[in-house]
Structures are given as structure tokens and as C-alpha cells.
Image: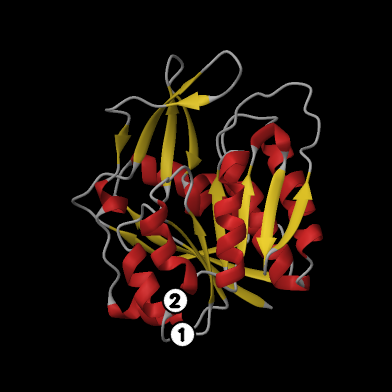
Amino acid sequence: MINLIALPCLCVDVFDGTDEMRAGGEALNFAVHSSRFEEINVSLLGAVGQDSYAEFIMKSISGKKIDVSHVRVEKDMVTANNRTYLTKDGDRYYKEDSWTGDIVDKMILNQDELELIRAADVVFVHFWAGCFRQIIELKKTSHFKLAVDFDTCRDFNDMEKYAPYIDYFMISGEESLLPIFEEWSKKYSGLFNMSLAEKGSVTFNKGNYYHVPAKDVKVIVDTTGCGDSYHAGFVCSHMMNEDIYEAMRIGTEFATETLSHFGGF
């Protein structure tokens, strides 16, 4: 069995106009899709408030094979939530005041949590997390595989500082950025994976190029969590069999399914 920890973003997406809620967040979406693999033991590490949003999150994953015993309950804080807007094509967008997320953005890991992470086989975190640099420091002296979602970050000088410590370097981008990651793959040992939306995905490893096309989708309902589901399929599959093409294929299947419904899972 492979022990996986996803952290720290658990949140609720509230869809504007209907106030329909969906549990989500990078870590939660990643954990749910990772739990589909029988060979993966999935644990969530994060924090929620003592409120209806937290109750909604826990209820939404109550039937999943996910260990939530390491999720803190911060009584004086609000569970992260995000007011989500959708275009007519199903693409999500946000406004300046959409996000309420200090409980995630300012989270500092304690010693017990750091030791839990140190003992894992693979750890997933997103670049914007308040505890990201703690994870990087821990990785320098630990043996777990580290998967990081850089999303749409474009500060390449900053990102490259972390590249030596990342096993799965994942980003959403466009084809013009591919040469940057090709060069990094020649300098650093990790897998450099870029999602190109309808053009599929590309991975570089040791200078080698891998491309898997996107699958046709008749109707895109909502893109929320599409990247998270791809990353879960990609990372978990590769952890199990180390086949890059197969990992990208599984990630593509997971992402295609996610496009067919509201929310990340």
C-alpha cells in the first residue's frame, strides 16, 4: 500500500445565483480522486471551522476511503469558502471578494503534523498554501515523493528554486511555456507536467517529451476541480507503476469525467 497525504485546502464552493454548495479545494479534490485507487491509503491534513461548511465537507466525503482524523477543527475560524461564478461555457471565475480562506492561507504545521508528513510515501500540496515552504524544508531531509500544483503561477524564477525538491511538478499553461519546462527537466529529476486544456497534457522527464491528447467532451458542465482530478490520476498511477504515458492517460480520464458535473467530484 502507498500512503498518501493531501493538504491543506478543504473548502466549499458556493455557486453564485443558486447558492448551491459543493465541497472542494485542491487537497480535498485530490484526496477524493486518489481514494479511487485500492492501492492508495489516503489521508487529509488541513483545518476547518466549527460551522455548517465543515459539516457539509465531512458529509460529502463520508462514504469515501479517506482518513480525516488529522483535519484540525479551529473553533474560532471560518471554514474556507469560495463564491464561484460560471461562464455560459462552464468555465469558473472568481471576483476579488470571492475567497474566505485564512484558515488555509495562514496554516502553520505543528510538529506532529510534520512527522506525519515525513512518514508518508507521497505528499500533495498546492503552491499557494501557507505551509508550502514548511513542506519544502521537510522534503530536503525526508524520502517522500512531493507533488505540487503550481496552477497558473508564472514567476518562473521563484518556481525554479523549488524544482530540485519536487517529484511531480504540475502546472496549467500554454504551449509557449513548454521550452522552459523541457530545460528544467534536463536539470532536475522530477516529472514536469503541464495541462493544456483542450490540447491535452505534456510531461517532460530527463528532456524526453510525452504528450497525451484530451478526450472529446460533448458538453462541459463545469471545469471546477478538473486539474485536481487529473493530478490525482497522474500521481497515483505513476506511484504505482512508473509508466508516464499510463499516468497521463488515467489523469485524462479522471479530468474528462470531472468536466461532466458540477463541482470537483
Q: Which quarter of the figure is the N terminus placed in?
A: bottom right
Residue sitting nearer the eye, 56 or 240: 240
Q: Nearer the viewer, residue 148 or 164?
A: 164
x and y, in percent, of residue 80 in the image: 33, 43
Which residue in the protein does label 1 denote? 142
The quadrant in which residue 223 appears is top right
Q: Is residue 101 left or right of residue 192?
A: left
Report whether 49 appears left or right of 240: left
Alpha carbon distance from label 2 to label 1: 9 Å
Horizontally, is 7 left or right of 3 in the view?
Answer: left
Q: Callout 1, which amino acid?
A: Ser
Q: Are marks 2 and 1 in contact (CB under 8 Å)?
A: yes
- Identified at 42% across, 53% down, the residue is 156
Where disc 2 sits, the SS reads: helix
* Occupied quadrant, residue 161: bottom left
Q: Residue at x 51, y 69 (%)?
A: 166
Q: Residue at x 26, y 44 (%)?
A: 78
Please tell me which of labels 2 and 1 falls first in the chain.
Answer: 2
Badge 2 is on which residue? 117
Residue 244, visible in the rendered structure: yes
